[in-house]
Image (cartoon, rainbow, N blue to C red):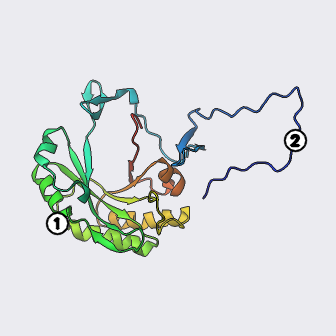
Amino acid sequence: DDDFDITPSVKVTPSPTVSAAVTPDFDDGEHVKITYKDGSEEWIAINDKIEKNNYDFTSLVNSGGILKYYSDGKNVSFSGIDVSRYQKDIDYGRVKAQDIDFVMIRVGARGYKNGELTMDEYFESNLKNATDAGLDVGVYFYSQATTVAEAEEEANLVLNAIAEKKITYPIAIDMEFVDNDSARIDTLTKSEKTAVTASFVNRIKEAGYRPMIYGNKEWLLKRIDISKFTSSCFWLAQNDEQP
């Protein structure tokens, strides 16, 4: 699943009449570009087994710092924030007043070194205060599961935490690489990451909730097989002006 820059080992002397090779332009609607953390780029073929969206991104408008999507002159999108202990105490009345519709709240995390499960100490207060303010609520779990059993353990922790709570948005698994350090999931193959994700997703679905998978383009297109999750939602992590 790694990416290699393979250079031919055979030395060829070009004819003076042959022009230099030109890098093909893959921006043809059939390929998508992935930019890795080191700045390198790769064009990969779009999976034709996955339904394409029909969004017109000229209808995506920045309104007071919040992106909104318009159809026939009406805003048909919903704006949200994701929160965890790192934001500490939040005034959800102000959040609601700033044209925010929903909140994705972190339930907990698995340690990327020791594998220990921990609850987010602000989860309960975030859930209560966001709900009291009239915001829709979904949740997510930061996963570092290396087996399907660990992924199911994480899903069960989430389900126990939200039992009898008002959850109106999806339940997401957030599995990703760690910046500037090694993590316990680094050695997993693409098929193993897919199996771990499926274990979490299936347990959430069995419990009657809507599962969601978080990831950037590299994770969703290179690190798991998203064609296995056609009934799941996707949370695209992308800090760009447009998706």
User: Which percent across, then down, holds residue 4?
Assistant: 66, 53
Mark earlier in primary sequence (2, 1):
2
- Circle nearer the viewer, 2 or 1: 2
Q: Which residue is mark 1?
A: 164
Q: What label does residue 12 carry, if any? A: 2
Q: What label does residue 236 carry, if any? A: none
Residue at horizontal 39%, vertical 50%? Answer: 234
Name the residue type under label 1. Answer: Glu
- Asked if the residue under mark 1 is in contact with the one under mark 2, i.e. CB atoms within 8 Å, the reply is no
Name the residue type under label 2. Answer: Val
**Residue placed most toward the observer, 11 or 82:** 11
Label 1 sits on a secondary structure element that is: loop
From this viewpoint, is residue 218 visible? Answer: yes
User: Which percent across, then down, holds residue 58?
Assistant: 38, 26
User: Which percent across, then down, holds residue 40?
Assistant: 58, 44
Q: Is residue 113 above or below residue 24?
A: below
**Residue placed most toward the observer, 231 or 146:** 146
| Residue 162 as seen in the image, left or right of residue 193 | left
Q: CA distance from mark 2 to mark 1?
A: 70 Å
Residue at horizontal 19%, vertical 62%? Answer: 122
User: Which percent across, then down, holds residue 118?
Assistant: 29, 71
Label 2 sits on a secondary structure element that is: loop
Q: Residues within 10 Å of mark 2 (few under 14, many from 20)?
A: few
**Residue placed most toward the observer, 222 or 230:** 222
**Which residue is situated farthest in the front direction here?**
180
